[in-house]
Image (cartoon, grey):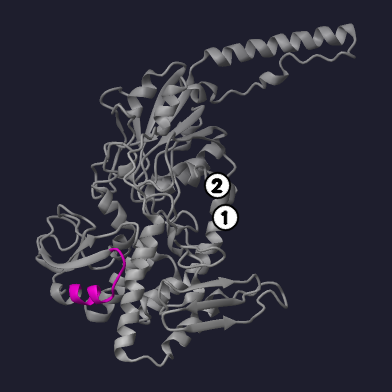
Amino acid sequence: MLRGFGWDIDSPFSSNRGDLLPVGSFGHTGFTGTSVWIDPTTETYIILLTNAVHPRGKGNAIGLRSKVATEVAAALNLTASEKEALRWKSITGYNEAFSAARRMGSRNGTVKNGIDVLEDHGFDVLKAAGQSVDTKNLDAKSTDATNADAKSMDAKTADAKSVDAKNLDAKKRIGLVTNQTGVDSQGQRTIDILAKAPGVSLDAIFSPEHGVTGTLDTTDINNSKDAATGIPVYSVYGGTDAARHPPADVMKNLDAVVFDIQDAGVRFYTYETTLGYFLEAAAQAGIELIVLDRPDPVTGSFVQGPVADAGRESFTNYWTLPVRHGMTMGELAKMFNAERNINAKLTVVAMDGWQRGDWFDSTGLAWVNPSPNLRSVTEAALYPGVALIEGTNVSVGRGTDTPFELVGAPWIKGKELAAYLNTRGIGGVRFVPVTFTPTASLHNGQTCSGVNIILTDRNGFDAPELGIELAAALHKLYAADFKIERMAELLVNQGAYDALVAGQDPRRIAQEWQEGLEKFQKVREKYLIYK
């Protein structure tokens, strides 16, 4: 368990354990910053007395708790063998405790995506889209009105009913943001379903990064027509900011836009920013955005990695999220709409049967690659960590059969790197030396030496921390060759980046971002749809 009765063991809030004390120890914190941590293995008791709320109510002792515990543990008079035993107890204890608490049985779920729920309900949400007359007031009459006023009221009501009847009879003009992942449980494209839906006219399709078929790995994606329906396809991905926003002249001729795309559950996956841009455009056009929800493929139960610094928004960083946010597109839409004060008319068609602990392979849904280089649930699980270093001069396996399962470069020594990473005892993964030759992307056609990352316990590892471990290892072993600078673009957390460059231990770096995660989770809680 991550928590005992009144005691914290290994939850995201157990910062007062520090970097060195093992799982199996336990503690408690107080509102004003006080804390106690007890480790039966070393017979150590750490008590911190402080008052973080005075004098101005803005203090925070989270970082101090961790530092005190780490320094105390480092100062313990242990022999070399005792230290080694403690280290391995911490590693294996972490895996056992974390896995026991988080392990989901091999659930054979039957999840219905938003598009399936929409079909089951006869497209009722779409039929109501764009309706402007308030039907609640159509029959209202004033009992105190004069006869003349009453006649006038009846005439106005009759006119309103006539207008409303026209609105109800007219087909709603719909736009659709989708790609190859937009299919229902029978494999039918959302495009084809909405093109035939009663009361709806599908007038525009918008395609995100990789195009409507999800096969293009370029910024040069032009407008086109859907081959099956003849409906115009407008690209909302390109090399400029303008190319990534929906065209205003198309949006203003629609009653609503439907959004149906499978996300990867990672802050820098661009479909999330595309969602934000459509919320903004819908608000500007005064139309509704309808999100057909889909699972977070790497579960909605883990919130990990550094929270992005405020004021550094980009196409790979729409808002101040952690790397792995544990939210669905529908939940993100609610959060973006409220927290960024977009205030668009938003409807989320929720899934049926999805649980927060579900990995994608527990849903009963068919896997469709959300992008060309995310080809399995394993690669999706590794992506939040390995992708953190792909902006540097290291190959992450693009141009091979197993992208994001490989890390390498011509100047890396695979055996050396694997040995170093394995001694780090990173929970949930092991590293095997490997050579590979990418046929595309970075180091195309060059023999690379590096590591194959073996995922041993997907519920027992922290993917963004894995990314920091990889970067720290490369920076330590190959400082003259590894170009760490561009990592800052996806990390988007200056404190974590500076600590990494300074050579701090990755576990300490990860500990420092816990405070930001705690704050984010309080905000996140308001927008969760599924429990």
On the image, which quarter does residue 178 sit in? Answer: top left
Camera-nearest residue between 369 and 257: 369
Q: Which segment is the magenta one?
A: 418-428
* Image-based side of 345 in relation to 509, left or right: right
Within-10-Å neighbours for mark 2: few <14, some 14–19, many 20+? some
Mark 1–mark 2 CB contact (< 8 Å)? yes
Is 424 inside the magenta-drawn segment? Answer: yes
Find residue 384 and report its horizontal and vertical position in percent.
34, 58
Query: Up-down: is 48 above or below 378?
Result: below
**Residue found at x 57% / y 34%:** 286
Is residue 290 in sight in this rendering? Answer: yes
Q: Tag 1: residue type?
A: Val
Query: Up-down: is 146 above or below 37?
Result: above
Within-10-Å neighbours for mark 1: few <14, some 14–19, many 20+? few
On the image, which quarter does residue 503 sit in? Answer: bottom left
Which quarter shows the N terminus? bottom left
* Secondary-structure class at tag 2: helix
Q: Which residue is disc 1 drawn over?
A: 523
**Tag shown at residue 405:** none
* Image-based side of 285 in relation to 326, left or right: right
Q: Tag 2: residue type?
A: Tyr
On the image, which quarter does residue 182 sit in? Answer: top left
Find residue 116 and report its horizontal and vertical position in percent.
39, 28
Is 29 inside the magenta-drawn segment? Answer: no
Camera-nearest residue between 91 and 148: 91
**Tag shown at residue 527:** 2
Find residue 281 and report its horizontal and vertical position in percent.
51, 40
